[in-house]
Image (cartoon, grey):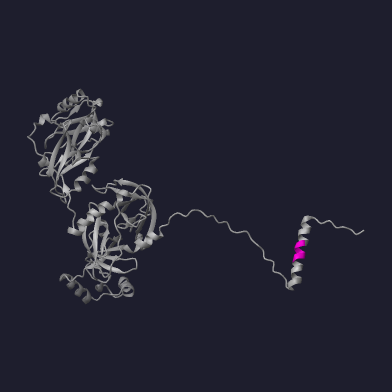
Amino acid sequence: MPKILKLSPKALLTTTAAAGLAATMLVTGLPVQNNVAYAEAVRVEAPQAPGFADVVDAVSPAVVSVRVQREVTPVSNDDSRFNFDFGGRGFGDLPEDHPLKRFFREFGGQEDRQDRADRNNRRGNGDERRRLRPVSQGSGFFISEDGFVVTNSHVVGDGSAFTVITKDGVEHDAKLIGRDQRTDLAVLKVEPTEKFTYVALADDKQIRVGDWVVAVGNPFGLGGTVTAGIVSARGRDIGAGPYDDFIQVDAAVNRGNSGGPTFNLNGEVIGVNTAIFSPSGGNVGIAFAIPATTVRSVVDDLIESGAVARGWLGVRIQPVSADIAESLGLAEPQGALVSNSETDTPAAKAGIQAGDVITAVNGETVDDARDLAKKIGAFDPDTEVELTVWRAGKAETINVKLGTLPVEQALAANTPSEEIPEEELKPAFVDGLGIAVEPNSEGPGLVVAEVDNGSIAEERGMRAGDVIVAVNNSDVKSAADVAQVIDKAAKDGRKAALFQIQRDNQNSFIALPIDQG
């Protein structure tokens, strides 16, 4: 009986594969190439986030580099040669074998006496060539096809020559149309040799925190560089000026990006990069841009007249703290407190006084001191506005015709008072406040002679040398006057008293809690 072989499945598979291979060889007469199949690489079909390439392609030709040069007179025009005085003898008077003479002859060249004399004669005749020296480089962007360029005021500085370099490397001479230091904006003009690609200003009021933005500029002189991020905050006040209202972004902005644009994803400029916060000097993700709304207003004025004309009230103002609001009987710490109404100004002529709180302009609520500055600055000079003022515990309406904001505002001067007998010029302590006061020999009010360490007055910022002009808008000439005003405020239910302080010819207000004294 024939012997039956039992094959395992593995052996059967191997045998079948071999039989198949042999069958193929018999049919074709050729050996078959046995290809090894590998598993495919891992690939994930994830949803793709929108990129920025289309935006960048569209806006990049409108972004430029701005190079600024200043005209300077060189101290010396001697081709970097040295001119020493050796004890009254010039270089040529040294002995021929002197080590210094041999050194300069070999490495620096010896200057002929006649050459030196000729050069000195040229100096005496004023024949000095003025040179242009590069002083800064920043960014900018075209806002019109005929060559108007927006950049920062601090980029152009006091330069005397300006060059605009486009994306393709072409250099164009530019002239300064105007600059506005208060908003740090400037406009340059390039004579058009072609129609320039330009970008539009967005309605930045539609920008929301969290929106994507793209910054394009010339950081560190590298040329067109693109960074992306989001809007981090709105309405930032960084102490740069009275009209601070910056958009904060986290896109990488570095030195050289100043004056460059920040775009939304529609390719519109939402702001002009102007400042960064950085302990190291480099990008840390906190950059500030001037909003497009401000840019539009300022640039229009600069193009039209070369300067920005703003309304002017003529007051010094400070914020209204919770303590100040309490001392004045205001329901909320809102508005702008007038610390000084300067003489011969629109405010003074209209009757605005120190201690008034301006709470509204033309019926629009004034949030704080910065808001008042922005509201007034938005009006043209000679515009008549209606101010709502909180005075002596009630609201009043005062009409003011605004003036023109001057470049420099004069400080209000003290008015000398009558001479005070020497025996009365002795410090007297005000009970409970931790201060000693004495009559002011140079004007009205009381001089703070001492401030106790750890007192509430010291904590709130009062210091020796300050002049207390008034307390709760009442004039004071003695410590007894101060105590009397405080007692009256306590009887009226007030929890704080408002001290008008003058320091370095500037007024401010400090609220001290009454229950402390």
* Chief secondary structure of the magenta portion: helix
Residue lying at the far right of the rendered structure = 1
Residue 451: tell me if it is visible. no
Q: Nearer the viewer, residue 103 or 382?
A: 382
Q: Quadrant of residue 109?
A: bottom left
Residue lying at the far left of the rendered structure = 418
Horizontal arrangement in the rendering, residue 286 relative to residue 354 (left or right): right
Horizontal arrangement in the rendering, residue 256 relative to residue 436 (left or right): right
Q: How many marks can you see?
A: 0
Q: Give the residues in magenta.
A: 16-20
Residue 219: tell me if it is visible. yes
Q: Quadrant of residue 366?
A: top left
Q: Position of residue 278 (x, y in %)?
A: 35, 50
Q: Nearer the viewer, residue 269 or 408?
A: 269
The C terminus, quarter of image: top left
Query: Relative to 374, does residue 127 appear above or below in the rendering?
Result: below
Q: Position of residue 483 (x, y in %)?
A: 18, 26
Residue lying at the far top of the rendered structure = 491
In reply to whether residue 499 is colored magenta, the answer given is no
The N terminus, quarter of image: bottom right
Query: Relative to 240, does residue 79 appear above or below in the rendering?
Result: below
Q: Nearer the viewer, residue 408 or 185?
A: 185
Horizontal arrangement in the rendering, residue 34 relative to residue 200 (left or right): right
Residue located at (38% from left, 60% from top): 56
Q: Position of residue 214 (x, y in %)?
A: 37, 55
Q: Position of residue 300 (x, y in %)?
A: 21, 56
In reply to whether residue 18 is colored magenta, the answer given is yes
